[in-house]
Amino acid sequence: MHPWISQRANSFDSSGIRRVFDLAAKLKDPINLSIGQPDFDVPDEVKQAAIEAIETGKNAYSPTQGIGPLREAMRSKVLADYPTHTDRDVFISSGTSGGLLLSMLAMVNPGDEVIFLDPFFVMYPALVQMCGGVPVPVDSYPDFRLNVAKIEAAITEKTKVILVNSPANPTGVTATADEMKAVAQLAADRGIALVSDEIYRHFFYDDQFVSPAQFNDQTIVIDGFSKSHAMTGWRVGFVHGPSELMNAMLKLQQYSFVCAPQPAQWGALRALEVSLSGHLADYQRKRDLVYDGLSDVYEVVKPGGAFYLFPKAPIASGAAFVEKAISRGLLIIPGNIFSHRDSHFRISFAAPDETLHQGIELLRTLATE
C-alpha cells in the first residue's frame, strides 16, 4: 500500500460494478441489463435550454445554493408539497450523490451510527465511512420491506441517522404509506435524523409515492433530475429539509463542490415543465415483461418502482452465477455489491424491449442448467 494513502480511502473498496464492466469489456455485443440509468435520452427541450444557457454566457459559477429561478421553482414545489413545514428550505446540489455526501458530512461525527436496509445502494456504507461514521445495515431479506421493528432493534445510543430509499436500488421495492409513517415517527420519537433518498420517486408503478417528510417535518430529502429526465451526467440534484441543516450543508458545498454546473441547472429548470408520463408507462410495461418472464423460474420480489429486479440466483453464489451469465454474453450485477449476502443478482430493465427479450430467454435457460 502506498504510504500516502489515507485510512479513509482504504476503509472501503472501489465499486464492484467496475469488475463486472472489466469482464464485460471482453464481450463484443453483450445483452446489457446492468446499467442503472434510463435508456431514453434527455428531452430535447432540456438540451435546448442548456444550449441556450451556454450560448448566452451562463457559464460561470452559480450561487452555491443554485441559480435563482431553479431554486425558487423548487422552493415553491416543496412548499406546495409540505405547506405546514414553515422551516423547510431547498438548495441545488451537484447530483444526488453530492447531496447524500453533504448530508452525511453535515450530521455524522466519528463513531456515529447510520442505519439503512441491506440490500443498499453501493454508496451508502462508503459515504458513512468517509465521515468516520459506522454503517449499520439492517437485513431486509427475503421480502426487502421497510420493517420498522428491525430498524428499531438496530438503534443504539450512537445512532445518528436513519437512511431510507424508496423506490429502492437494487431491489425496486417500494415502502407503503404505513411503513413510511412508522419509520418517520420512530425517528421523531428517538430524536434521530431521517434522510430520504427519493431519486426514483417518479418511477412508482402500483401505488402513490409517499415521502416520510409527510409525517416528520425534520426529514432531509435528497432528490434530483438524473433518473427522471435521464440527466445522469449533468449532475443536478436538490436537497430540502430544516433550514439550519440546509445552511450547514451549503457551507460544506461551498468548500467542496462549489455549485452544480450552471448550464445544467438551466436545463433542469426546463425539465420541470416536461411530462414524463409516457416514459413511466413504458417502464411499468417493461417491469411487467421482465417479472412475468422470470417469476416462474426465479425467486423474485415484484418491484413496485425504480427499474430493477433483484432475483435470487439458482445456485448458492450470486457472484458465481453472474460470472456464468457474463460468460454467455449477459451483463447483470452480483447482489453482493449491494449486500452482505451473496445470494442474489440485479437486473436493470431500463433497456430496449429486444434486449429484455434476449435477457429473459438466456436467464430462463441459465435457471435450469
Image (cartoon, grey):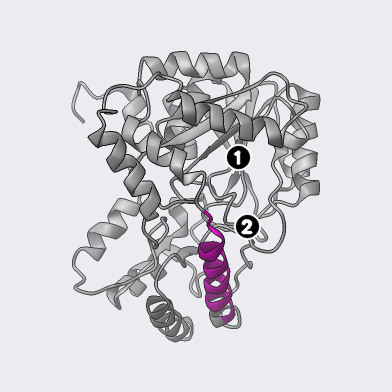
Residue at 55% over, 32% down? 73
Residue at 74% over, 47% down? 147
Residue 325's quadrant in the figure? bottom left
> Looking at the image, is mark 1 or mark 2 nearer the viewer?
2
Residue 151's quadrant in the figure? top right
Quadrant position of the C terminus in the picture: bottom left
Residue placed under numbered mark 1 in the picture? 116
State the image coordinates of residue 137 (x, y, percent, origin top left): 58, 41
Residue 109 is at least partly visible in this image? no
**Residue 167, magenta (yes or no):** no
Q: Is mark 2 on a helix, strand or loop?
A: loop
Residue placed under numbered mark 2 in the picture? 204
Residue at 32% over, 29% down? 9
Quadrant position of the N terminus in the picture: top left
State the image coordinates of residue 146 (x, y, percent, origin top left): 70, 48
Instruction: Report the span colored magenta.
Output: 275-292
- Give the amino acid at mark 1: Phe
Query: Which is nearer the N-term, disc 1 or disc 2?
Result: 1
Left or right: where does residue 24 sit relative to residue 238? left
Q: Residue 26 carries which label?
A: none
- Give the amino acid at mark 2: Phe
State the image coordinates of residue 273 (x, y, percent, origin top left): 51, 47
Q: What element carries label 1?
A: strand
Q: Which of 358 and 134 is in front in this view?
A: 358
Left or right: where does residue 72 sit relative to residue 327? right
